[in-house]
Image (tube, grey):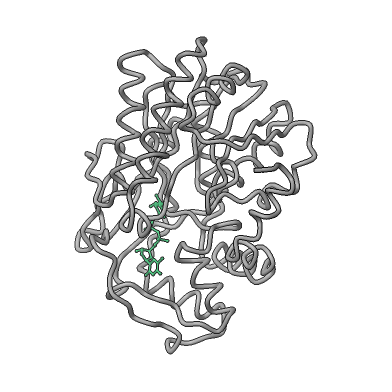
């Protein structure tokens, strides 16, 4: 699919953390493209993230739900390809109520696939998924990593909904010959991340003088990747990925939650006394680790922005310097802004 001609790219969920970083990158690095961003603006979609490009003739925002078939039909007819980020993403929320996850992640993906097919032509779709579909790795076999061949074994309602959407994408390629590429990435960090995820939650708590709630024994391991490395991977998958294939992206940056917490405390000039040990997350996956060699081989992709301590340090600094952003996000004030701008 390399050499694909994109005039207009549809991005779903472009007001979220990863989606908005992708929109910024695509507008910057692909000057010939126009981006249409469809986002429902639920609790975590935030138009502030894209304020800087709002006036650009190469950017258009449409408020709407990806599960709205008529809306998606209309958008797909005037776009050449789609990158599908829109999803409910927070594991703890899915444990409390999985309904919105099934709606956005499963139904939403099915509607987009159907709309892509109905629009005809060979529109490429990148389905952005997660390493959590593979389940959990043991702590005592550090050499094991998720590859694209690892069977799916989702453990939370969130990852189950993403696995279901991955199956729909796979079936669309197999049954209808659709040009779908699926990506699965490890834990992202960087600017504009909603402060329910562990890094912005801990940093913003510490700025406010509050303790950080560490789940269980803190031994769980995540493979941290900078959001811009992830976005570069999605862009590469869009332009160079093979139809029907899955590509993993990881940061080669495994840290236990305790190690992560101590690093954040160090950067913020605080000590262990700021850790509050809290009850573990039910079904808490022990370890994620990604083998990205297929993406390196086939897409020429590398994680170049994820190395710690520099990347973590820069991220912590971003939250310290953008207090207004996360305070507005926490208070939900951006929704008032949205209503004034766009109605509804
Ligand atoms: O691996 C990719 C996934 O990473 C994405 O698919 C998910 O959408 C994203 O939410 C993330 O999932 P995690 O559950 O790993 O991320 P979270 O930031 O919620 O938690 C990271 C680790 O920190 C996890 O082991 C749980 C722990 N944690 C989290 C929170 C919110 C705490 O110890 N305390 C907390 O308050």
In-front residue for pair 60/206: 60
- Looking at the image, which residue is at 39% across and 46% down? 100
Q: Position of residue 197 (x, y in %)?
A: 46, 62
Residue 107 to residue 46: above or below: above
Query: How far across and how far down the image is residue 16, in percent?
Result: 56, 48
136 shown above or below 173: below
Instruction: Answer with left or right where residue 83 lies relative to residue 181.
Output: right
| Residue 143 in which image quadrant | bottom left
Which one is nearer the viewer's eye here, 198 or 87? Answer: 87
Residue 329 rendering spot, x and y as whole percentages: 60, 61
In the displayed structure, 247 sits above or below 189; it is above
Q: Camera-side residue: 125 or 296?
A: 125
Q: Ligand 1 falls in which quarter?
A: bottom left
Q: Quadrant of the C terminus?
A: top right
Image-based side of 106 in relation to 334, left or right? left
> Relative to 182, is 134 above or below?
below
Q: Position of residue 121 (x, y in %)?
A: 52, 10
Residue at 30% across, 66% down: 220
């Amino acid at each position: 699919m390399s050499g694909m001609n994109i005039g207009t790219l549809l991005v779903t969920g472009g007001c979220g953390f990863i989606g908005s970083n992708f929109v910024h990158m695509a507008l910057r690095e692909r000057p010939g493209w126009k981006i249409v961003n469809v986002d429902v603006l639920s609790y975590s979609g935030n138009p502030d993230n894209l304020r800087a490009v709002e006036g650009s003739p190469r950017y258009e925002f449409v408020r709407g739900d990806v599960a709205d078939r008529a809306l998606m039909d209309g958008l797909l007819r005037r776009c050449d390809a789609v990158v599908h980020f829109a999803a409910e993403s927070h594991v703890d929320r899915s444990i409390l109520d999985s309904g919105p996850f099934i709606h956005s992640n499963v139904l939403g993906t099915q509607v987009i696939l159907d709309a892509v097919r109905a629009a005809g032509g060979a529109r490429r779709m990148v389905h952005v998924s997660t390493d959590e579909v593979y389940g959990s790795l043991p702590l005592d076999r550090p050499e094991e990593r998720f590859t694209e061949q690892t069977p799916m074994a989702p453990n939370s309602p969130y990852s189950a909904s993403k696995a279901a959407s991955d199956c729909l994408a796979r079936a669309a390629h197999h049954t209808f010959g659709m040009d779908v590429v699926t990506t699965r990435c490890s834990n992202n960090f960087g600017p504009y991340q909603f402060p329910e995820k562990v890094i912005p939650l801990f940093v913003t708590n510490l700025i406010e003088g509050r303790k950080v709630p560490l789940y269980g024994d803190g031994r769980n391991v995540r493979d941290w990747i900078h959001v811009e490395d992830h976005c570069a991977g999605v862009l590469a998958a869009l332009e160079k990925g093979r139809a029907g294939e899955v590509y993993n992206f990881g940061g080669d940056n495994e840290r236990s939650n305790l190690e992560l917490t101590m690093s954040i405390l160090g950067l913020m000039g605080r000590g262990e006394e700021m850790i509050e040990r809290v009850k573990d997350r039910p079904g808490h996956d022990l370890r994620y680790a990604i083998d990205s060699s297929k993406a390196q081989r086939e897409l020429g992709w590398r994680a170049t922005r994820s190395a710690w301590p520099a990347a973590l340090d820069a991220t912590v600094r971003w939250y310290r310097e953008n207090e207004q952003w996360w305070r507005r996000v926490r208070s939900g004030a951006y929704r008032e802004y949205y209503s004034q701008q766009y109605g509804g």
